[in-house]
Image (cartoon, grey):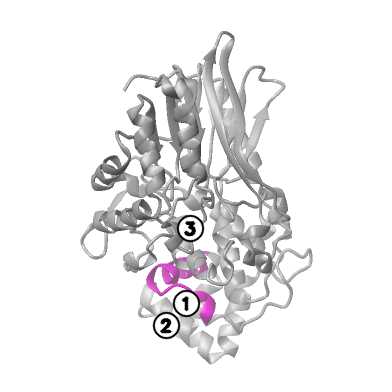
Amino acid sequence: MSAKPVVIVISDLHLGGGSADPGDDHVFDQQQLAGFIDTLRASDDGLAGRIELYINGDFLEFAQVGQHLYTLRSADAWCSEGESRAKLRLILDGHPEVFAALKAFSAAGNRVTLAAGNHDVDLFWEGVQADLRAAAGPIDFVLGADWTSRFDGRLRIAHGHQHDLANQFRHWAHPFVSGPDGQQRLEMCPGTLFMVKFVNWLEGNYPFADNIKPVSALWRILARENTLGLVSIGWMLARFAARHPGVTMGGKADATNLPQQLVEIMRADDAIGGMLRGWYRTYLDGSASDEQIDAALGDPERLEALIIAVMGGEPAGAWESALARARVARTLGEGQGTLQLAESQKMDDKLLFREAAKAELTRAASPAEVVVLGHTHCPDDWRWSELPGKCYFNPGSWTRYAEISKQARLSLADLKDEAAFPYALNYVRIAAGPAGLDAQMQAYARCEGGL
């Protein structure tokens, strides 16, 4: 297909199984996405076939839809091609109006491009691509690229998950692994593991839990709980964040005494001690004695390794349930709390993504004028005084969201009512103008919320 003079970028739709899927967080009470696509098609540019609709990652919610279809217990291997296609079928059946709208949009001469994100790495399967094209027309796919260019490099687009350590793939250009069952499978990034084995379980009681994005941001909320199972998951995510390139974290994130406190609880509670030592022998060292295990779990690296192994190998919620009755003396996040993670509140994903955009705009010999990212679910429209004529956009998500600036005040109890949160169904329109690219972010629909 030829290049189009108008590019429309949307991101993070997270389509699930529709009305039959209680975990589908995509805003579709008034068929907003299908209506948006139809509106584009009916515009002057759409009728002339002048538009490329670029869906910038996480269009399809493979990580959450059809949870019964992925049964492999692994911390490294995600779906097989058959499992991904079965998940896709639930999405196609749940939102037929969306895929019909995409087909009509393409039939008018416009272009549809799907870029894979961390929630739809499943787009790498050729069978998934074929099924999508059968339902939605001649879709183009962007797979394994850190950045995509339009307008001779003046527009640069990326989903952004490769800037987020918790959702980063080791081999994004070719994310395939051999699973423990002998099948070729997709690589499992840490954020997907966390979603499948923790957030999906947590969502049963707190429906908005999976809308806290990126997934690593949920640690701030868990840090204020007083159940050791939840706190230790938050602690693990804080360690992910502390290792994130470019993020300034307080030193107390790694100085916390959580490992030592956990060992003390193991020694005082035979049930907890027996469970955790058994898991240690199953997943890390089958010949270790109780004393060796207790000493090892006092090391943050070994404790983190055990949590990840248990999340991958045991049923959802197993780690939290094992530690449900163990309490911490004070909640994390209080300046003098037992686990003292208050200094780590310096992480700000919005600022991090602005810096990533700025680096791309100022890269040597780069003609970039406009950068568009996604992933964070928080809209952003940013320009720098020292970079005249250059700008960065993040349209956010077509789900309800929590502003990053407000996440530090949320509790798990706040996540019970999804309707309390706002949504802004934004898109970025970029077209070539006489003085450079004409780029602006607009809202197709919005709803204010109280949180």
Cα gap from disc 3 to disc 2, whole angstroms: 36 Å
Q: Amino acid at mark 2?
A: Gly
User: Which of labels 3 and 2 is toward the front?
Assistant: 3
| Three-letter amino acid code at the position of disc 1 | Ala
Q: Is residue 44 visible?
A: yes
Q: Is residue 63 left or right of residue 437?
A: left
- Rendered view: 159 above or below 79: above
Q: Which residues are magenta?
A: 301-321
Q: 246 or 194: which is nearer to us?
A: 194
Q: Earlier in the sequence, mark 3 or mark 1?
A: 3
Residue 121, given in percent of the width and then of the height, sits at 37, 48
Extreme residue toward the left, this view: 182
Label 2 neighbour load within 10 Å: few <14, some 14-19, many 20+ = some
Looking at the rendered image, the disc whose residue lies closer to the viewer, 1 or 2, is 1
Q: Is residue 278 left or right of residue 140?
A: right
**What residue would you read off at disc 3?**
24
- Near mark 3 (Cα within 10 A), the count class, few <14, some 14-19 or many ≥20, is many
Q: Against 187, is 117 above or below? A: above
Q: Residue at x 41, y 19 (%)?
A: 48
SS at mark 1?
Answer: helix
Q: Secondary structure at mark 2?
A: helix
What residue is pinned by disc 1?
318
Identity, as a three-letter code, of the amino acid under mark 3: Asp
Name the chief secondary structure element in magenta. helix
Which residue is rendered at x = 56% and y = 30% of the image?
428
- Where residue 5 appears, as percent x and y from the top left, is 45, 18
Alpha carbon separation for disc pair 1 and 2: 13 Å
Find disc 2 in the rendering and name its residue. Answer: 278
Q: Element at badge 3?
A: loop
Q: Position of residue 3 (x, y in %)?
A: 38, 19
